Amino acid sequence: MKLEKILVLDDEDGVRAVMTDLLREMGYSPLAVGTIHQARGMLKQESYDLILSDVRLSDGNGLDFLQEVRQIQPQARLVVMTGFGSLDSAVEAIRLGVFDYLVKPVNVSRLKVTMERLEQFQQLQSENTYLRREVNERATADIEWGRSPAMGRVRELIERLGTTDATVMIEGESGTGKEVVARELHARSVRSTQPFIRVNCAAIPATLLESEFFGHEKGAFTGAVQRREGRFEVAHGGTLLLDEISEIPPDLQVKLLRVLQEREFERVGGNKTIAVDVRVLATTNRNLKAEVKAGRFREDLYYRLNVVPIEIPPLRERGDDVVRLAEHFLESFTRKHGKTRMTLNAAIKKSLLSYSWPGNVRELQNAMERAVILASPEKGLTLDDFAFPHLDAEVPAISVEGKNLAELEFEAIRSGLRQCRGNRTHTAAALGISLRTLRNKLVLYKKEGKEVE
């Protein structure tokens, strides 16, 4: 990851000139000052990636100043330069967390090694920040693929596409395991040793998505107290997963199209063009063709993303995979919660296969963990430990004015859309539901052949 903001602090004009020239030859754009007072002023105006400072300065001690920097800009990397190398000063520099210690006159090759190590460290740190966030978001249990013909076709596509650099659109209902497929594609690619970065487009406010994608410069907007790299930059050399791509607003769709075509962008509030080498994968649980037809998603962006589509079947269409996955989760959660080994009896298997699993694999995973937690050590796993309805039980029909709940819901949504003149945002607000819930309902009604809009 390129170090962009570099400050050189040395009270000798010749040293400043030499260091500045060397860094420019390496492709950097450093700024140089001669006093601690000047450096303090620069730090108030800008955030820096790297500060190279002499130890003995005309208006103070460089190590004392770097200690100040630690409080003002903790993200900055520090490198010490000195013409009076000593063990004591080296130990003090290490204590302050200085990245490297250079003895003047600085050797060109030595400086180059330091800069390369710094960039590698910056890249790893950015990756770790995002990966820690990803680990916190992901479920604790691994997901098994299953053996159904439907998943066999998915596996075959993954094997074919894994070794390519193709952009892939992964489609499927919520909870089917789209992210798992994306991670598998990355793991099989030549980029497998490089970062895999995911951005959930539906979980981030539309006003912040551009900054999340491309990063921002200090002062670009209220709250931008320092420069920040975006997900495209962090994913350089690796894979970027755009989760729930349909949630991207139209103005950002234009900018995303440019990145996919030209592999370059500018940070929010910046004018420097940044080139990236990233493989892009995208997921959606909505019909993007319908979104294109409705004018909510750009047609050119759709075709750019949909180079190769992979459709993940819902769990209800995967036959005995339900039981296989349940057994996989059962084993995983008994270990996690320190329970004795349990098995699925015939009644549980029957109910697992009878239930439609609207939440797909994610719902099954949650149901299995709940059942393991509730299971009695004496009785083991029983049907009573599960929350899904027993479809073989006789349930009395409940209706209001001759209509069941699903019919009443359909009428409410249809009426709401008519009253709000087709405005989905206003309709969702009036009905007290999220815009995503409304969209999912409309997709369901379309599949069922019901006219709403």
Image (spheres, helix red, strand yellow):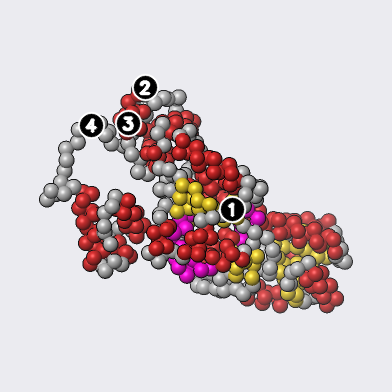
Badge 3: few (under 14), some or many (20 or more) residues near its Cα, within 10 Å? some
The verdict on residue 120 being magenta is no
Q: Amino acid at mark 3?
A: Ser
Q: Which residue is mark 3?
A: 351
The answer for how far apart the CA atoms under marks 4 and 2 are is 26 Å
Question: Compared to 379, does 45 lie above or below?
Answer: below
Q: Which residue is mark 4?
A: 393
Q: Amino acid at mark 4?
A: Ala
Q: Are marks 4 and 3 in contact (CB under 8 Å)?
A: no
Q: Residue at x 72, y 63 (%)?
A: 78
User: Is residue 133 or residue 250 the one in the foreground?
Assistant: 250
Q: Is residue 259 left or right of residue 36?
A: left
Frontmost of labels 2 and 3 is: 3
Q: Amino acid at mark 2?
A: Glu
Q: Is residue 284 left or right of residue 376?
A: right
User: Where is residue 304 shown, x and y percent of the image?
Assistant: 53, 60
